[in-house]
Amino acid sequence: MLRYHFIKRILDFIVAFIALIISSPIMALTLLALILSGEFSPILAQWRVGRSGQLFLFYKFRTMKKQNTIGSSLTLANDNRITFLGKILRATKIDEFPQFFNVLNGDISIVGPRPMMPEIFKMYGIDEQQIIASVKPGITGLGSIIFRDEQAILVNSAKPSTVVYKQQIAPVKASLETWYVENQSMLVDFKLLVVTVWSVLYSRTRLVYRLFKNIPRYQL
């Protein structure tokens, strides 16, 4: 397992470094577009739960109105806090690009449990929190892939979003992240990267369930 984590860290660094070089023109244009739109704090830095439960600053391009980000920690598909440019950045996943700096810094990996805000992370069970926090979080992973339409699930429910998340989404997502921690390997990571790319191209794909037949499933 030590060898796995050592190799993973090297690959994380290489992939993140290359990704930053390739995406740097897009990020520069995004920064310029955000500033021209009137956003003078284009990078959002949020505290997220990392390995061993330690908090770290997680970077994304700002997609929501700054004065309204104090509201709910959950974002809905039609959330009026999201700016017009923010909708584009979210749809194309460009808002996620600054996370490669977190990978270079060693805060997160390319693949791993999704780094959560403390108040959302606490919705997981205590035992699951300990298991999930035993590894570095990641940009992509089982929870991120299967709940890529999480915002739509929240907005389509008649119940309050916090209730839906805590009762329906959090238990399954915690089980998925726990499954990953208990079964992590280079092969699992490679499969998750393949599914991530495929999911971006074909959002309705069920490939993740074909490659991982014994993972927990979410039922509406």
Image: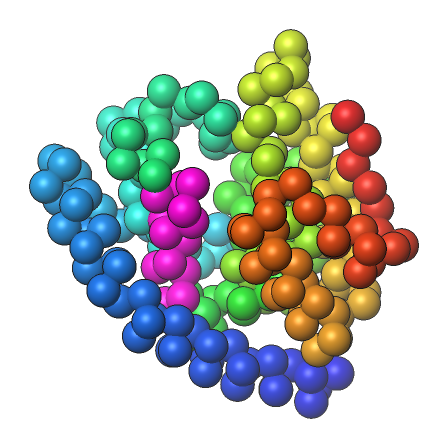
Q: What residue is rendered at 35% in x and 59% in y? A: 98
Report the quarter where the N terminus lies: bottom right
Q: Is residue 36 above or below residue 43?
A: above
Residue 121 at x, y percent in the picture: 61, 43
In the rendered image, which quarter is residue 41 located in?
A: top left
Q: Is residue 177 left or right of residue 14?
A: right
Q: Nearer the viewer, residue 93 or 122?
A: 93
Q: Is residue 94 above or below residue 74?
A: below
Q: What residue is rendered at 40% in x and 66% in y? A: 100
Number of marks in the image? Answer: 0
Helix, strand or loop for the magenta stretch, by majority: helix
Magenta span has 140? no
Given the current orientation, which residue lies at the most extreme front position?
Answer: 202
Q: Nearer the viewer, residue 95 or 112?
A: 95
Given the current orientation, which residue lies at the most extreme bottom position?
Answer: 3
Q: Is residue 29 left or right of residue 78?
A: left
The colour scheme used to paint the residues is: rainbow
Q: What residue is rendered at 60% in x and 47% in y? A: 202
Q: Is residue 146 left or right of residue 196?
A: right
Magenta span has 94? yes
Q: Is residue 126 left or right of residue 82?
A: right
Q: Report if residue 53 is visible in the image.
A: no
In the rendered image, which quarter is residue 156 located in?
A: top right
Given the current orientation, which residue lies at the most extreme top position?
Answer: 158
Residue 201 at x, y percent in the picture: 55, 51
Q: Is residue 97 above or below residue 123?
A: below
Q: Report if residue 189 is visible in the image.
A: yes
Magenta range is 89-101
Report the quarter where the C terminus lies: top right
Residue 55 at x, y percent in the picture: 48, 56
Q: What residue is rendered at 60% in x and 34% in y? A: 150
